[in-house]
Image: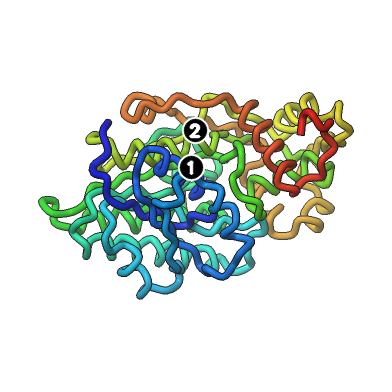
Amino acid sequence: MEPISRGKVLVTGITGFLGSHVAKLLLEKGYVVRGTVRDKKNEKKLKPLQALPFQERLELVEADLLKKDCWDSAVDGCVMVAHVASPFPVAIPKNAEQLIRPAVDGTLSVLKACAKHKEVRAVVVTSSIAAVQNLAKHAKDEYTEEDWPDLAACPPYNKSKTLAEKAAWDFYNSLDKSTRFKMSIINPGFILGPSLIATDFTSGETIRQLLTGDAFGLPRVNFGIVDVRDVAAAHVAALESSKSDGQRYLCVSDHHLWFEEIAEVLRQEFGKYGYKVTSRKLKYCSVKFVSIFNSAANAIVPFWGKEHRFINKKIKEQLGITFIPANESIIKMAYSLIEAGIVPNRLPKKTA
């Protein structure tokens, strides 16, 4: 797969866990990258980007998912767009619209700008397995790209991702087939792996709480895990591939782990250094658990005890993705959190 051109690629949400990896890979492959940030004065957010390679081919512009007018100038001059930015909070807001509005409106604002600028030839949008997995009672346990959730059974985050992706497809299908850009969607699972950023983010906070023992317990929840480096590779491959137009791709490794299995991986690697990894298994979503974690615990309830499987055959065959083992992703994330100072460093000097 050859790059469409040596032109400029827009990466929305470049300061995020995934966005920073997408930008890094694009820079390493020789692209010019323009990244969107909400505030160019936020030094804490921008500092990690200074460590990305090929700084001479990286530029930053301000843009916000809630501000429609900024995306025209952000997209101008770009030949490809990776729309990665989307809200993914640690605590689920009481008002679901706080998630849904920026997810849906932001996605449409970016796509409308892409349609206006005819030099844009390829777009990839980050969705989620949350827009595939059905949490309704008696739902099936195995999923492919053909599946969509029952919105009535969706927690706020799942609903926001589903509505945003459906809005993207509706807009794409409304465009003239002869002149529209090619578009594909990546639906990743629970993203782990080494972090390039030092700010808090949801999957990093999960591993931090487990590693430090701050987590109240281990809920009976199962994850389809994927490494952030594989998700970034999938985004770039989708942009470059001639087969990806009009396709969505489940981006999940072959490893689906329970919370207690994730904790055990951390315990085996870091227990010898004095880390007290959370070990208490929660048999049910108790009142105490809900009272401590508030609405975030309520969001876990639909997942409790369910072991869903996501078939990754399509992304392997069409985009050539080979997945990093989940154990490596978990361990790499933990080490990167320690290195960033998010988790206290108890490692021997030669290990740190």
Query: Camera-side residue: 40 or 292?
Result: 40
State which quarter of the image contains the N terminus.
top left
Q: Residue at x 13, y 56 (%)?
A: 176
Q: Position of residue 234 (x, y in %)?
A: 40, 36
- Sequence-wise first label, 1 or 2: 1
Q: Where 253 sits versus 18, above or below? A: above
| Residue located beneath label 1 in the image | 129
Question: Horizontal placement of 29 versus 204: left or right?
Answer: left
Q: Amino acid at mark 1?
A: Ile
Query: Camera-side residue: 149 or 217?
Result: 217
Q: Position of residue 289 (x, y in %)?
A: 80, 51
Query: Camera-side residue: 214 or 148?
Result: 214
Q: Residue at x 74, y 32 (%)?
A: 260
Question: Horizontal placement of 209 versus 128: left or right?
Answer: right
Q: Amino acid at mark 2?
A: Val
| Disc 1 secondary structure class | helix
Between circles 1 and 2, the one closer to the viewer is 2
| Residue located beneath label 2 in the image | 252
- Determine crowd level at label 1: few under 14, some 14-19, many 20+ residues with C-alpha closer than 10 A: many
| Disc 2 secondary structure class | loop
Q: CA distance from mark 1 to mark 2?
A: 8 Å
Question: Which mark is drawn over residue 345?
Answer: none
